[in-house]
Amino acid sequence: MVPHLVTALTGPINELEQRVLDSMPAIERWFRMEWTEHTPPFYCSVDVRNAGFKLAPIGTNLFPGGWNNLTPEMLPLAVQAAMVAVEKICPEARNLLVIPKNGTHSHFYLANLIQLQRIFHMAGLNVRLGSIDPTLKKATTYDLPDGQKVLLEPVIRSKRRLELKDFDPCTVLLNNDLSTGVPGILEETHEQYLLPPLHAGWPTRRKSKHFKCYEEVAKRLGKLLGVDPWLINPMFEPCPALGLNEEASLERLSSQVDVVLTRIKRKYKEYGIKEKPFVVVKADNGTHPLGIVTVRDAKDMQAIRERIKTLFKEQKSSLLPHDFLVQEGVLTQERVNEAVAEPVVYMMDRYVVGGFYRIHADRGVDENLSTPGSSYVPLGFEHSTHLPQPGIKPGASAPNRFYMYGVIGRLAMVAASYELESTDPNAEVYE
């Protein structure tokens, strides 16, 4: 069933949709050629925003949770993609070890692990869940409200391998973004395939690097479509080593906010857009106690200063310098059952396998929706994202709109492949 969408299928975005549909053969060939030269991330999810006048990604997750939001109708796509992904990496694979994030797990996250197990089991693998959380000392079963059970077992580290009791995997899948650092137990596992690689984790990864790579591929796809790349690309400026307790650092942040806001205003004027421009300030790697902050003007910068003072009092110590990103804010004109919504596209290997709408009834069109109180509605794949409906006028077909979301998601996935290649510590460097 397609969710009830309000405003999603109207507005100037229709012209972009028509360009995408008209260029479908060229787009698919472009992606094919990219994947002959580059390796896609094993899996990822991309948050997309449809502002009505532009469609752009605002975040790419290389360790996606939320697989439990994929409906049963989406599973065949996920299983087929998993088969392809595993076959490319280790055709003789028999055992797969999935390593979840550390800490206390919500029922939602545990359901995500069950779904991952189900997908890879149907792809022909024996799958077990191994925790590297040092507080998990023995195999533990968790009960979910719907009657399902999840067994987490402590990982055993031999000299060069990660194992469980009576289980020796050839492939290890991380569902842990390593935001607290790379633990020694995961290092130097040269005899096993570790997916995604360690340098995909937040100790190495920077959002600014990803969006720099995305900017490059967006320019190329924009040229192919004959559109301004800005229509599919959010502007940004990095703000590295920002000391929130230093006035000079806050002035630097304020300056970067002004730079990005000025550039957005110029584009809004060019396109006759009457909306109020805004930027989003967020951690460049992982998350930060400051959270994700929307800034529209100097008044909001003052609110950030007040928030920082509160953090100092809460933490009773200075906050260490951190890398931040100032990113163009992209409105969302999507609604599901009157609540503000944004599509999230899920991919494995080079394929779109499904997705959902993240919705939040208490948030505005210019605010972060990935906060407590958000909920999820599956994207209505009455037809696959790979089966758009040519000939139907723009804005009249949900599958066409979902196909366009998939194009943007895959474009972000190409950018992620560039990003991982550029940060690979084992890559050969040619003079």
Image: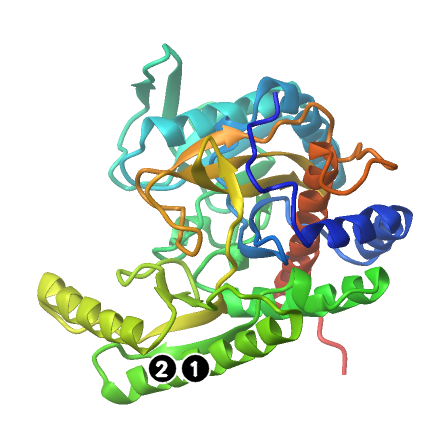
Task: Inspect the image, locate mark 2, and give the three-letter code of the amino acid beneath it.
Answer: Ser
Farthest-out residue, top? 147
Task: Inspect the image, locate mark 1, and give the three-letter code of the amino acid beneath it.
Answer: Asp
Q: Who's the residue at 57% across and 54% down the image?
A: 51
The residue to which callout 1 is attached is: 258
* Residue 163 higher or lower than 1, as above or below: below
| Residue 287 visible somewhere in the drawing | yes
Q: Secondary structure at mark 2?
A: helix
- Across and down, in percent, residue 342 comes to 51, 44
The residue to which callout 2 is attached is: 254
Q: Is residue 177 left or right of residue 141?
A: right
Mark 2 → mark 1, Cα distance in angstroms = 6 Å
* Residue 320 higher or lower than 337, as above or below: below
Q: Who's the residue at 60% across and 42% down the image?
A: 8
Q: In the picture, which quadrant includes the N terminus?
A: top right
Q: Secondary structure at mark 1?
A: helix
- Across and down, in percent, residue 116 comes to 53, 28
